[in-house]
Image (spheres, rainbow, N blue to C red):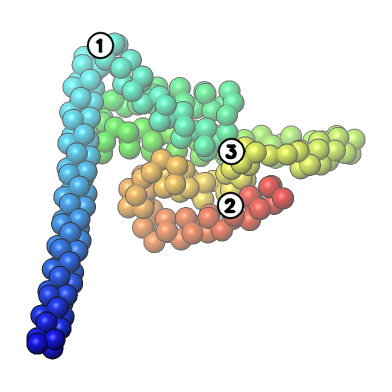
Amino acid sequence: MRMFYSFVFIFAAHSVFFCISLLIAIKIVCIGIKQKLSLSNLIKAKVLLANKTQSEDTSLIAKARQGDKAAFGQLVQKYEKLVATTVASMLGRGEDAEDVGQQVFIRFYDAMHDFRGEAQLSTYLTRIAINLSLNEIKRRKRKNSLFFSRRSPEQEKEFDIVDQQNHQADYDTKEAVNKALQRLDPKFRAVVVLRMMQGYTSEETAKILKLPLGTVLSRLSRAQDKLKKILTHLLH
C-alpha cells in the first residue's frame, strides 16, 4: 500500500513539474512573440513617421518654390539643430561653424528646384553640411599652412607654451570627446559624425559620403581605434 501511495506521489510530483515547465515554456514563447510584435510595431511606427515627415517636407518645399518664405522658414526651423550639430561636430563650435551652417540652407535654397526627393530632406541637408564642412577644413589647412610658415622663432616659443598649458588642462569627458573628434582626419571624422553621432546606418553613411560600404566600415573601425588612443591621452 505504501508503495502505491509513493508511486502516486511521484507521479503527481512529475505531473506538477511537467505542468510548471510547460507553463514556463509557453510564457517564454509568448514573451518572444510579444518582443517580435513590439519590434515590428516600432519599425512600422518609424516608417509611418518617416513617411509623414517626408510628406510634410514635400508640401513645404512645394510652397517654398512658389516663393512662400514662411514655408522655407519652417524647414530651416525644423532642421537647423540637425545641421548645427553636424557642422559643429566636424568643425568645432565657433563663428566658422555658424557661417557654414547658414551656408547649408543657402545652398539648399539655391538648389531647391533641383531637389527631387529621392532621399529624405534630413539626409540631403546632412550631405551638404558634411561637404561644406570638409571644404572649410581644407580652407583652414591652407590658411594655417600660410600662417605657420611666416611665424618667427619667438612666436614658435609662445605657441609651444600655450600648447603645454592646454595639454596640462583638465578635460571633462564631453570636452575630451570634442577635442578628440577634432583631431581625427576629416575623412574619419565624417564617418564618425554620421554613423555614431547622427545615428545613420553604415549603408546610409556610405550613400551620403558616396563611398563603398567596405570603405565606411574600415574607416569607422580605424576611427574608433584612433579615438580610443586620443581619449586615453587626453584623460590621463
Of all residues, the one furthest to the front in this rendering is: 1
Q: Amino acid under label 1?
A: Asp
N-term mark: 1 or 2? 1
Closer to us: 92 or 114: 92
The quarter holding residue 29 reads bottom left
Q: Position of residue 180 (x, y in %)?
A: 61, 45
* 7 w.r.t. 208: above or below: below
Q: Which residue is label 1 attached to?
A: 68
Q: Position of residue 91 (x, y in %)?
A: 56, 35
**Which residue is painted at 52% across and 46% down in the image?**
189
Q: Nearer the viewer, mark 2 or mark 3?
A: 3
Q: Which residue is label 3 attached to?
A: 174
N-term mark: 2 or 3? 3
Q: Position of residue 20 (x, y in %)?
A: 17, 66
The label number, if any, that marks residue 44 in the structure image: none
Q: Is residue 88 at all visible to an observer of this figure?
A: yes
The N terminus, quarter of image: bottom left
Give the class, few, some or many, for how many residues have Cα within 10 Å of label 3's Cα (few <14, many ≥20).
Answer: few
**Which residue is painted at 85% across and 38% down in the image?**
161
The label number, if any, that marks residue 227 in the structure image: 2
Q: Nearer the viewer, mark 1 or mark 2?
A: 2
Q: Nearer the viewer, mark 1 or mark 3?
A: 3
